[in-house]
Image: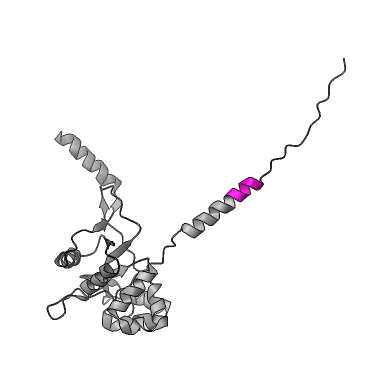
Amino acid sequence: MGKVKIKKSDIWIDMTPMSDVMTLLLTFFMLTSTFIKNEPVRVNTPGTVSTSKVPEANTLSITISPEFKKGADGKDEPTGNGLVFIGMTNADQLGQILDKMSPDCAGNAMLRKIFESQAQFGVPLSQLKTFLSANDAQRANIMTGQEPSVKAGIPLDSIDGGMSEFQQWITAAVGVNNELNLVIKSDSKTPYKTVKKVMSELQDMGESHYYLATQLDGKKVVDASNYLLQTK
């Protein structure tokens, strides 16, 4: 009996529907994603055992970093103080805050646009115009304390017994959006006295609800779990 030959045929899969779906998904994520602005001041947050998440939207971040100065050997040495910076992602609200804090800068279309593009800001009000008039590299140097002509950090000292500039910025921000989530991000090496000062300033304003940004520390979680087991 002769062998039956089976006709072989190539398998063809139409990939058009999959390509359409991938294009739609890519377009959706591009339109709905919020791009993170580059932050010139970054902090290493301390470890914690808390698993509570800090809100990612509708937030005002208060970053506190340690202050350094050049020593006799040319190396950076801590001064024992901290520097305070504020950041928001909503450009429209940033512009409205600038209207309240510095009408002179807000009236300049170029300076207003630059301010709205900042991920973080932190200089005395008297030097805000100088800060915004600088180029990107100079602004980054100012924020990191490498430009001695402009003081980095928002002042925490009260003015004539009234509100400090930090409190004025927070008041302006809350006035623009009273549902803001305040988030304090502090470097693990930041002097505690500066962190305490920021908390006291918020408390004096009646802003007693805020988040502390930390990172989950696996070792601390294990130690805490062992401690709870031992106490049972």
Image coordinates of residue 61 in percent, x first then y, are: 30, 64
Asked if residue 15 is positioned above or below residue 150 in the image, the reply reads above
- Between residues 178 and 198, which one lies in front from this camera angle? 178
Q: Residue at position x 62%, y 49% from top?
A: 19
Q: Which residues are magenta?
A: 7-21
- Residue at the location (21% across, 38% down)? 226
Is-magenta flag for residue 45? no
Tell me if residue 40 comes above or below residue 6 in the rendering.
below
Residue closest to the eye, 161 or 84:
161
- Residue 1 falls in which quadrant of the image? top right
164 sits to left or right of 135: left
Residue at image point 33% right, 74% down: 96
Q: Residue furthest right?
A: 2
The majority secondary structure of the magenta stretch comes to loop
Q: Quadrant of residue 183?
A: bottom left
**Is residue 83 something that shows in the picture?**
no
